[in-house]
Amino acid sequence: MATCHLRLYPHDEGDATQTIEQEATVSIRLGDLFPVLRQALKANYVWLKDFQDDEIRVTQDFYDVVRAFGSLRPSA
């Protein structure tokens, strides 16, 4: 089983080029994100809730699949 590592980077207060809105700077495969999110959801980690209003960008086909899946009714 792969181990997930969290990397923390210091915030440079003197960086004048930084904008107020944080821009996405990292690309990650969804498959690499699943185990981390699954563990955080299962253990109900508070830090996950800090990001629940953040927006992510996905491809149109993935968005269509997620929307269709969300509208399905559970089978009996």
Image: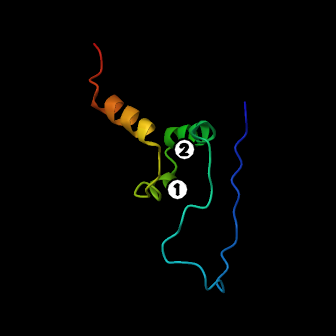
Mark 1, other Cα within 10 Å: few <14 / some 14–19 / many ≥20: few
- Measured as percent of width and height from the top left, residue 17 is found at 60, 81
Mark number displayed over residue 5: none
Q: Where 1 sits versus 13, above or below?
A: above
**Disc 2 residue type?**
Ala
Identify which residue is drawn at 71% across, 48% down: 5
- What type is the residue that disc 1 sits on? Trp
Element class at badge 1: helix
Q: Residue at x 53, y 41 (%)?
A: 43
Q: Looking at the picture, how far across and down is residue 18, in whole percent?
A: 58, 78
Q: How is the image coloured?
A: rainbow
* Number of residues whose C-alpha sits closer than 10 Å to that of mark 2, classed few (under 14), some (14–19) or many (20 or more): some
Earlier-in-chain disc, 1 versus 2: 2
Residue 40's disc number: 2
* Residues at marks 1 and 2 touching, judged by CB atoms closer than 8 Å: yes
Determine the secondary structure under disc 2.
helix
Q: Which residue is mark 1?
A: 47
Q: Left or right: 60 with respect to 34?
A: left
- Residue sitting nearer the eye, 5 or 32: 32
Asked which quadrant contains residue 70, the reply is top left
Is residue 35 rendered to the left or right of residue 5?
left
Does residue 24 lie above or below 10 as drawn?
above
Q: Residue 37, percent across and down?
A: 54, 42
Figure check: 72 above or below 46: above
Name the residue at 47% across, 59% down.
50
Which part of the image, by quadrant, shows the C terminus? top left
Which quadrant holds residue 34? Answer: top right
Q: CA distance from mark 1 to mark 2?
A: 8 Å
Q: Position of residue 6 (x, y in %)?
A: 68, 53
Which quadrant is home to the N terminus?
Answer: top right
Give me the residue at 43% from left, 36% from top: 61
